[in-house]
Amino acid sequence: MRNALLIAELSLREAIRKRLVSVLLLLTALFLGFYLYGIVRLEGTLDQRSLDAGLDGRSLNGASNLPVIYSAMFGMYLVYFLGSLMAVLSTVGAVSGDIENGVMQSVIARPISRAQLVLGRWLGFSAVNLGYVALLSAGLLGGVYAITGYLPPAPLAATGLILLSTLLLTALTVLGSTLFTTLANGIGVFVLYGVGFTGGILGSIGAFADTPTLTTLGRAANALMPTNALWLGASYHLQPAVALQISEASRGANPFFANAPIAAGLVVWAAVLAVLAVLAAMYRFSRRDL
Amino acid sequence: MLSRVNAIETQELRKEYRGRAVVESLTLTVPPGEVFGFLGPNGAGKSTTVKMLLGLVHPSAGRVQVLGGSPHDPAVRERLGFLPEQFRFQTWMTAEEFLRFHGRLAGLKAAELRARIPQVLETVGLGGRGGENLGGYSKGMLQRAGLAGAILARPQLVFLDEPTSALDPIGRVEVREIIERLRGEGTAVFLNSHLLSEVEQVCDRVAFVKQGRVLRQGSMRELMGGVLPLDVRVDHLPPGLLDTLAGLGELRHTDTNTPGRTDVELWLDHEDTIPAVASAIHAAGARLYALKARRPDLETMFLDLIEDTPDSSARTARLGQGAARA
Ligand SMILES: Nc1ncnc2c1ncn2[C@@H]1O[C@H](COP(=O)(O)OP(=O)(O)OP(=O)(O)O)[C@@H](O)[C@H]1O
Ligand SMILES: [Mg+2]
């Protein structure tokens, strides 16, 4: 374990020294600034409108506040998307990159087992990616709250599910980087990510059109790649009753938001899948010639 | 703390890549503290062998023992040092950070490392430059940094895969000195090279490999059939001198073509006979211009061996048979 932590520490230092962290912080600031500025303007317009209508205030969870509610939800969708992108791009060469540029040989000749190395890489990159998503989520929801006073019903549960999705994606990307070249891995994980999204779309069309086959296909895709299902679960926690009523009225014809909480089994499966991916990566890397 | 187990022992070691044997029935023994030269042309399988001995590559068949254990055992690798053929390291680190990272992986304590890192940097000629990023190092400096990493944890066995490929002539001499110092400390060295002069000067024993097979192995003396060639140059040959010399060793060659100079090649059984040759020449009244014991000449031996060995065509036939049997 000491060795795995040493590798995790190395990965963190690498992220800092290669300016990954500073670029991320800068882009986070840009994204949040841009988005929150939009919300400041939105809030101003809404306040003006309610004044014009002769009302002296809006209910935070009422229909009149729907624009703010939806902007918080879409903002979190962007957080989920950016977090996924980041998880794949930062981690895509976690193992393969070091093999390809020849750094791995001298490291593996040291008294460290290959399983420890894979574990350390996953821990290190997970720390970076989770930190990024946590920062974005806190910045976005905190910003919206500071500007409008609105907070989604269960922000922690929602953020937790997005973090789990990031963790899973990081694990799958680490696995891919022990199996393929860096480029092939990046393409492969994005395709998987697409499979998850397809699952969400099929599922929502299936529910809308009442087609069991599509629902089953969607469920299979979700099991294979639960990231999108985790996002949908998070989206449920971001919707107050008024937004859920709209969702239900449209019978779920919206692949971005769900009107039901995620099945507990799927959450457990996502966590198990992440662990399995790391174990498979350890196994695969131990068998590989360098 | 010199252990008596062999530094390296392999039996019928074999590695195939896509059905093609890259290393074949390799049986080697390297005793502790020995400097062993592993020689062969490009693509002979030298680096692959080293990687198998380090556990980086999994053998297709055969047995490997390094320092009495398996190279897959971290406790064994703790006592190994390795300079890879492609010395690429994390370019975002400084040399000191690189060494600290490797030292910690090797289980060295922080205090130990603080003393040891400047020491090894000095040894490899990078004293005072440890604070620079490896990304800014020249090729030779990188190889020196890798060498520092290889000897950092005071290993009992060091693998050097072409350690001087990027070095200037001074660097080559320095590497030779480092190897000699390692030998003095009882560290075994496995030296991969095709620079024959380098191997000649430092190695106790050598093995020649070609296309994955060991063609011959042994000490320099053994490889030369145990003889020591001696070149003698005198102004003339007084009567009887040749007979005396023939009594001391085997007379191979006499060249009297140039007036006022005679060259004689003599094969001795033993170094201790050299002073007797000099005395005999003085006693006969000839003037001695040169008396030089030639080290067994690896270059000639290498070329002879490599050229004399049946090449690919014959071997493909043999491989074909192997495949048919399998
Ligand atoms: N990963 C691999 N996949 C396929 N073939 C390989 C692989 N690694 C090595 N080989 C083959 O094995 C043979 C021996 O390679 P190796 O690197 O051991 O040679 P070498 O003796 O170190 O040569 P050099 O003097 O050029 O360094 C070569 O023919 C090479 O093509
Ligand atoms: Mg080589």
Image: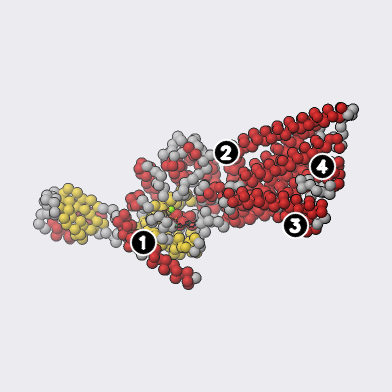
**Quarter residue A129 falls in:** top right
Do callouts 4 and 3 mark residues in contact (Cβ within 8 Å)? no
State the separation of the CA atoms marked 4 and 2: 39 Å
Which residue is painted at 57% across and 38% down in the image?
A: A18
Chain holding disc 2: A
State the separation of the CA atoms marked 2 and 3: 42 Å
Q: Are marks 4 and 3 on the same chain?
A: yes
| Element marked by disc 3 | helix
- Mark 4, other Cα within 10 Å: few <14 / some 14–19 / many ≥20: many
From this viewpoint, is residue B248 visible? no
Q: Earlier in the sequence, mark 4 or mark 3?
A: 3
Tell me the residue that label 3 is attached to.
A217
The front one of B18 and B218 is B18
Q: Which mark is residue A239?
A: 4
Q: Amino acid at mark 3?
A: Leu
- Mark 2, other Cα within 10 Å: few <14 / some 14–19 / many ≥20: some
Tell me the residue that label 2 is attached to.
A18
Q: Nearer the viewer, mark 4 or mark 1?
A: 4
Q: Earlier in the sequence, mark 2 or mark 3?
A: 2
The front one of A58 and A204 is A204
State the separation of the CA atoms marked 1 and 2: 49 Å
| Element marked by disc 4 | loop
